[in-house]
Image (cartoon, rainbow, N blue to C red):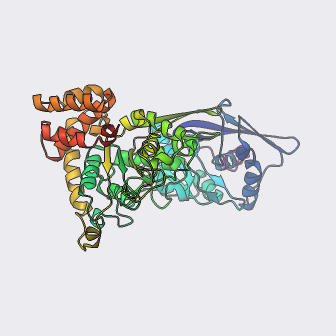
Amino acid sequence: MLARVRSATLTGIEVATVFVEVDVTPGLPSFTTVGLPDSTVRESRDRVRAAIRNAALEFPVDRITVNLAPADVRKEGAAFDLPTAIGILCATGLVKTGRLERALVVGELSLDGSVRPVRGVLPVALHARREGFAPLIVPVANAAEAGVVSGVQAIGVATLHDAVEFLNGEREIAPARGDGVGFGTPFDVEGLDFADVKGHAHSKRGLEIAAAGAHNVLMIGPPGTGKTMLARRVASILPPLSLEEAIEASTVWSVAGLLPLERGLLAARPFRSPHHTTSEAGLIGGGGVPHPGEISLAHHGVLFLDELPEFSLRVLEALRQPLEDARVVVSRAAGTASFPASFQLVAAANPCRRGCASFATCACSPGDRARYLGRLSQPLLDRIDLHLDVPALPVAQLAEGAGGEPSAAIRARVLAARAHQTARFVGTSTHVNARMSGRQTRRHCVLSGEAARLVGLATTRLGLSARAHDRLLRVARTIADLEGSDSITPEHVSEAIQYRGLDRAR
């Protein structure tokens, strides 16, 4: 007898429907899986056989052929265990076809018949809603993740027996409703606050501008001056995730298998901080079967790269396209995958290779320092909007008991500036100043005579490229938004020019 069960496979964050076709015919006992399965899928025959028997259900002693269609799409992972088991039971008459007609099933089986969680359930739920599949049967541990998608009948099952009883109408299981526990709250999980940072008023101002317009920023200063401390607090002044942003970011985390099972959505904007020894595939994404890298895991959040010049040149240059396009495309023999990468880059660097405490005691020559920072190519620096100097603080300032302005006060100004941008870009796909297109920059960054003269002077004297010129205008637009000004004044332009420190140093 032939049975067919719908399941799904992932290519990057894209989902395709897979039909698990099971044919059980008389003959010598065998279990064959075809349809371009990987080793994990081929091994499922042993898990499925043991799970059916240990669930006190009858496993057929016949010839079993499982076809995963379409056959030209590679299938990977253990998510086909549950649909395969249900297909076998349906082919032998133990599962009715009524509820199975429009159902979509994913899940890994343990040998005792319990259903284990799998990755990528959130994009699968979005796919089920798009295609009108119902119910969506998933592991109970993934039920909250699937339940955040409105309009999807997400049924969480703990065991194979639960799935069989539900499909046969012998037991009703209420659809899951994930509420995204903690969703939409500011980043304060670790209690990080700008009030902990003494001094560095100039750097805090630069980071406030960066947060207000989602601009990329590079901090340069000796070791121990507070660069990392400042960077880790950037997320505390960013706006909360919107529902759309939370679903997009959580989708990437779900595909990577990192989404917390106890909630359906990320609670706050991601903050990723990979080590400088990370590989190109680890940062950008890749692998035999393409998987998301750190820049995609930081989607709608912050990517912090400490010791930026210490990253390999291949990794640094690979950042250029995602910084521009907010998306990365990974091509491998197994296929091509596209991952979102709309992240805010916050980077830090020492002024020299040895990381000397100050220029007064630095043993490096000016040429050594220039060569060290010269590892950062000009095209990469053009894509970083603000260059901040973070000097060492005087001992007297370190001894002061009073801290700085709290993150809540800074975040209020950032939210007000973002509100101006939301109104400005209504009806477009742009949401923040840093993502303005060239046409939008010309439209929304109109300069007065004196402001235009300053920009022209800075472009000539600093040798700014056309890209750096436009980014200078966008930073000036953000500074004006922080002040609630509709026009960009010479003062706004002057402050924006101050944040092109590495261009002045060339």
Residue 354 against residue 324 in the figure, above or below: below
Image coordinates for residue 384, horizontal then vertical, percent? 36, 40
- Boundaries of the magenta span: 86-99
For the C terminus, the image quarter is: top left
Q: Is residue 1 magenta?
A: no
Image coordinates for residue 280, horizontal then vertical, percent? 56, 42
Residue positioned 42% across, 42% down in the render? 370
User: Looking at this view, is 195 or 39 the one in front?
Assistant: 195
- Total labels: the figure holds 0
Image coordinates for residue 483, horizontal then vertical, percent? 14, 46
Image coordinates for residue 132, horizontal then vertical, percent? 47, 38
Please, which residue is most extreme toward the right here? 28
Residue positioned 18% across, 47% down in the render? 482
**Quadrant of the rendered image containing residue 170:** bottom right
**Quadrant of the rendered image containing residue 463:** top left
Q: Is residue 239 left or right of residue 76?
A: left
Q: Is residue 341 left or right of residue 400?
A: right
User: Looking at this view, is 332 or 490 the one in front?
Assistant: 490
The answer to whether any part of residue 135 appears in the image is: no
The answer to whether any part of residue 247 appears in the image is: yes
For the N terminus, the image quarter is: top right
Q: Is residue 96 magenta?
A: yes
Q: Is residue 140 left or right of residue 365?
A: right
